[in-house]
Image (spheres, rainbow, N blue to C red):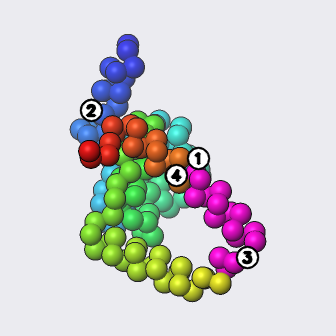
Amino acid sequence: MSQVAVLTSLASALHSEAYSDLVITCGGEIFKVHKVIICERAEFFARAVRFSGKETGSGTIDLPEDEPSIIKLLIHYLYFGEYEPRLPEDDDRKGLCDVVSKTISENMELVEVPEVKVLMTAFNGLALGILKQKIKEHGWRKKE
């Protein structure tokens, strides 16, 4: 069986919920998954199933503290080994910008500490490298 066929089968199993034997609940969302995939790829779930406390005695693991959208991305990653990072929604971006701005404002004095300057230089180089890679991947060019 080709790799494409295997991935197609996994996608089909995940989306149809056929033969699912474990339920993950999170914030009102219900994810019907397969122990053989989830437990093999994530030790957290393997332990939860193996030690069969109240969480898995009923075949359900409840994650009340987690964000459903993140759990959905995690499950996708466990099935396919990759995921599409997503940008926050506009409201979330504003909140994120506010948090970042506040954090920067509260810590401006640290910019002058020599060790922090070294770290900033290293991280700026890393960020620039990632940006250049994305520009190349997407074929973005300067407008002439």
The disc placed on residue 128 is 4
Q: Residue at x 61, y 58 (%)?
A: 123
Tell me the number on the disc at residue 12. Answer: 2
Q: CA distance from mark 2 to mark 4?
A: 38 Å
Q: Earlier in the sequence, mark 1 or mark 4?
A: 1
Magenta span of residues: 110-126
Using residue 84 as the reference point, say whether residue 53 is left or right of it. Answer: right
Question: Callout 2 environment at 10 Å: few (<14), some (14 to 19), or many (20+)?
Answer: few
Residue 113 has which mark? 3
Could you say where residue 134 lies in the image, as x and y percent from the top left? 41, 43
Residue at figure coordinates x 39%, y 37% from the top left: 137
| x and y percentages locating residue 112 in the rendered image | 69, 78
The quarter in which the N terminus is drawn is top left
The image quadrant that residue 71 belongs to is bottom left
Provide the secondary structure element on which disc 2 rests. Answer: helix
User: In the rendering, at what x and y percent does residue 63 appear?
Assistant: 44, 63
Q: Earlier in the sequence, mark 2 or mark 4?
A: 2
The tag earlier along the polypeptide, 2 or 1, is 2
Tell which circle, 4 or 3, labels the residue nearer the N-terminal end.
3
Can I make out residue 79 in this image? no
According to the image, label 1 marks what residue?
43
